[in-house]
Image (tube, rainbow, N blue to C red):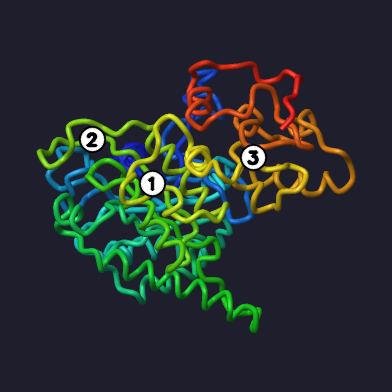
Amino acid sequence: MDLIEKLKILSSAAKYDVTCSSSGSTGKRQKNGVGNTSINGICHSWTSDGRCISLLKVLFSNICIYDCAYCINRVSNNTKRATFKIDELVNLTVNFYKRNYIEGLFLSSAIFRNPDYTMEQMLRVIKKLRIEEKFNGYIHLKIIPGADLKLIKEAGLYADRLSVNIELPSEKSLKLLAPQKKKENIIKPMNFVGKNILSNIEERKKYKKVPLFSPAGQTTQLIVGASSESDFQILKLAEKMYKNIHLKRVYYSAFVPVTKDSRLPKTTPPLKRENRLYQADFLLRLYKFSVNEILNESEQFLDEDLDPKTTWALRNYQYFPLEITKASYEELLRVPGIGIKSARIIIKARKYSRISFEELKNIGVVLKRAKYFITCHGKYLENTPLSPERIREELTGKNKMPLFSYNFIER
């Protein structure tokens, strides 16, 4: 099998991992021209300093000994199989990098032979890149669940980011859909990486020459909708991981039926559910919400029609309206339509000038949502205040009113 065929197979097999977002182009202006692009293997990701970079996203091998019901690479699935040689993947990465196609490598693998052997092969790739090829590009490496912790510790010295995919939100689902995988083989390396990242940060404060360990942190992926867990259960798990194992990010992936199995659901979850989970996740990580404020035992799924912050605000309407000229930074962050950046600008701007609704719009406040929850110098924007039920109707598209009209109603 030639290298191009391997690349097609192993990049296609990697596309269901959303810890990097895939993209590509099929542009061809002239036959056999220089710079023709291919959809194979290139994705974009964000580094720890906020840069968007392009990565070569591939599996080392799609030959797997496991038979997870939802996975395209499961051993019982009739698909083309391939495995890179160490030198093939190293040369491919270096050549792509020198041609400016990519700025780094995203490397994962199906589990062939056993977890330790697979992890060793991937480790050899990134060590050769760093030591022999002097490769300084970004490397995101997937940890193989069940691999020896010594291999994981060594991998953290060469990779910028490490990640272990949890995939299923509960042990019960793991036993049903991926019975060969064990919960402890997934959680143990995540805890290990989290502790090592924290200790490395502390050591580097004392000794600058201590080598970096996974400086861009660790992430994980959860599949949504392949099993029966609610949004409340999924977000509880995410919240726990953020607090306990120094996780940088949870990626949510709506279940895509790529295999046939009677244990899998017959319908796929709407992409809106994935989107709502990302919105709720932002509230957990950046807006200091707790899961119990967003959902609870009696309300286990996110609202399909409204984003989680708006749903929270309507449920807690007794805290509104907030006076925009007096509210604290933390209070402003709870207003639908006001983000972190706009809250900071409001706090700064109101020290020096009289703020108005027009200025709020220029700052970046989404007034079509925020107007129901704020006053500006004691005044509402037109047609407010309304009851939470009426606001919900307005925001979901029923009885819409114009966004801007400057006939304010006295509070």
Q: Where is the N terminus found, in terms of image quarters?
A: top left
**Amino acid under disc 2:** Val
**Labels 2 and 1: the sequence-earlier one:** 1
**Amino acid under disc 3:** Pro
**Amino acid under disc 1:** Val
The quarter of the displayed image where residue 2 is located: top left
Left or right of 199: which side holds 380? right
Q: Nearer the viewer, residue 323 or 103?
A: 323
Residue that numbered label 2 is attached to? 258
Q: Is residue 301 above or below residue 288?
A: above
Q: Is residue 322 above or below residue 190?
A: above
Helix, strand or loop at label 1? It is strand
Residue that numbered label 1 is attached to? 58
In the rendering, at what x and y percent does residue 356 appear?
Answer: 80, 33
| Residue lying at the far right of the rendered structure | 352
Residue that numbered label 3 is attached to? 321
Q: How much space separates mark 2 and mark 3, taking CA atoms?
A: 48 Å
- Please name the residue shown 69% across and 52% down the image: 329
Query: Nearer the viewer's eye, disc 2 or disc 1?
Result: 2
- Please name the residue shown 29% across and 68% down the image: 147
**Labels 2 and 3: the sequence-earlier one:** 2
**Labels 3 and 1: the sequence-earlier one:** 1
Q: Nearer the viewer, residue 177 or 136?
A: 177
Q: Dot 1 surroundings within 10 Å: few (below 14), some, or many (20 or more)? A: many
Q: Nearer the viewer, residue 133 or 40?
A: 40
Query: Nearer the viewer's eye, disc 3 or disc 1?
Result: 3
- Please name the residue shown 58% across and 81% down the image: 203
Q: Dot 3 surroundings within 10 Å: few (below 14), some, or many (20 or more)? A: some
In the rendering, at what x and y percent does residue 60 appear?
Answer: 33, 52
In the rendering, at what x and y percent does residue 316 appear?
Answer: 51, 44
Q: Dot 2 surroundings within 10 Å: few (below 14), some, or many (20 or more)? A: few
